[in-house]
Amino acid sequence: MKRSLPALVLLCAGAACADEPKPKTTPVTPAEEPAQWGRGPLEVRDPYLLALSRLSPWARSPEVLGHGQVEVGLRGMWANSYGIEPGRFVVDGEVRQLIAAVRFGLLDRIELGLDLPYEWRGGGALDGFIEGFHDAFGVPDMNRSDRPKDRYLVAGIESDGTPYGHEHDGYGFADLIATGRVLVTKGGRLLPAVTASIRLRLPTGRPKFQLSDGVDVSVGVDASKRLGDLPLFLSGHAFYTYHAQGRVDGLELYRHRVYVGMGFEWQLVPRVSLVAHVWLETKRERKAFEDGRPPIPDADLGFGDEVVTYYAIGFKLEPVDGLSIEVGMLEDIIDPETTADFGLLGNISYRF
C-alpha cells in the first residue's frame, strides 16, 4: 500500500496537467504587421513654365489620414526653366511656388484635401548657381554663360510664322486643386499598400495668369511595399490626366496624358528618411515653335517628341510626432528644353 501511494499521486498529477490548457502562440494580426509605407516620396509636381497652365499630378505615400485627423502644410518650390534654340524659341525664367495644403481624414480609409498655390514668375536668381552646379558635376549647361542672366523671356515663332510671347510674369494665386483618396488595401507580407486618388484642377487663377479654362481631371494609384522587415521601401505611381483644353494661350497641347513613376526610401534612423523617385509623363506640347526644317519637320521644343522626365531626391524628417519636414532638389533627366532644368523644394506639415 505504501509503495502504491506515490504512484497514485504521480498518476493524479499527470492527469491534472493533461487537463490544463496549453499555452497558445498568438498569431501576428495584420494590424501588428509592419506598415507597407514609409514617409513616401517628396511631394513635387512639374514646375516647367509651360506646364503651369494645366494640372500636373504628383506622387504620394499610400498612407491616408485616420478618421478625424487633420493635416495642414506648406509646400515650397523654386525652379528654373531654360531652353534656347537661336531663331526658334526661348524659354528662360523661374517660378517660385508656395502651396497651402489642408487634408481631412474620413472613416479611416478616405482622405479629402485642397491645395492652393501662390506663384511668382520672373527672371529669378538661380542662373549663376545652376552654372556652378552643372560645372561641378560635369552636366552640360547649354551655353548658359553666353546668355543674359536672371531674365524672364518665353517666346518663339509659331508654325504659321507669327511670333509668340508668353507674358505671364508677376505673382498671384494659381488654380485650386481638390483631391480625394481612398486606401484600397494596407498590404501585407506579400501585397503592397495601394491607394486610389482623383484630383480636380479648378480654374480659379485665371484673373492673374492665362491658365486653362474648364476642369482638369487626374485619376491614379500610389502603391508601396516594405522589403521584408528592413527599413527599405519601394513605391510605384501611375496617373491618367484629362485636360479640359488642348490649346492654351496659343500653344497646342495634348489633352490626354499619362504619368508613371517609381520611388525608393531608406529610413536611416526612425525619424529620418532618404527618399528618391523618378517619373515620366507623356508629351505635353503637340506643336510649339515650329520651324519646318529637316530633320524635324514638325515643331517642338528640341527633343519635344520625348517624354517629360524628372528625378527628385532629398530627406524627410519627423523631429516630433506629427511634424514632417521635406528638403530636396529636382532635376530633369533627358530633355532640359521641355522640363524645368533645376529646382529646390522645402515642405512642412503638421498632423493633429
Image (cartoon, rainbow, N blue to C red):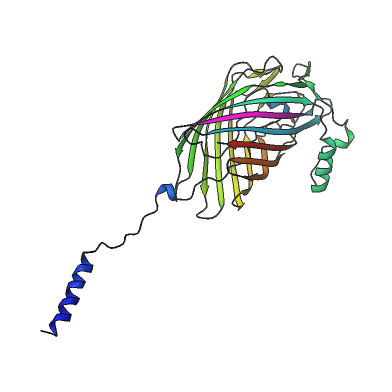
Query: Residue 306 is drawn in which quadrant?
Result: top right
Residue at the spot x=62%, y=25% of the render?
A: 55
| Residue in the foreground of this view, choosing between 178 and 83 | 178
Give the residues in magenta: 94-105
Residue at the spot x=77%, y=21% of the render?
A: 170
Q: Quadrant of the C terminus?
A: top right
Residue 333 appears in view: no
Main secondary structure along the magenta-highlighted residues = strand
Query: Residue 11 is drawn in which quadrant?
Result: bottom left
Residue at the spot x=62%, y=32% of the render?
A: 282
| Residue in the foreground of this view, choosing between 57 and 78 | 78
In the rendered image, residue 301, in percent from the top left (x then y), is placed at 74, 29
Residue at the spot x=85%, y=36% of the render?
A: 144
- Specify whether 124 is left or right of 317: right
In the rendered image, residue 6, in percent from the top left (x then y), is placed at 17, 81
Up-down: is 117 above or below 188?
above
Up-down: is 147 above or below 245?
below
Up-down: is 259 above or below 53?
below
- Specify whether 107 is left or right of 169: left
In the rendered image, residue 235, in percent from the top left (x then y), is placed at 55, 44
Q: Magenta includes 218?
A: no
Q: Magenta includes 96?
A: yes
Extreme residue in the front direction: 2
Query: Residue 16 is drawn in which quadrant?
Result: bottom left
Q: Quadrant of the N terminus?
A: bottom left
Up-down: is 324 above or below 33?
above
Residue 104 appears in view: yes
| Residue in the foreground of this view, choosing between 243 and 71 | 71
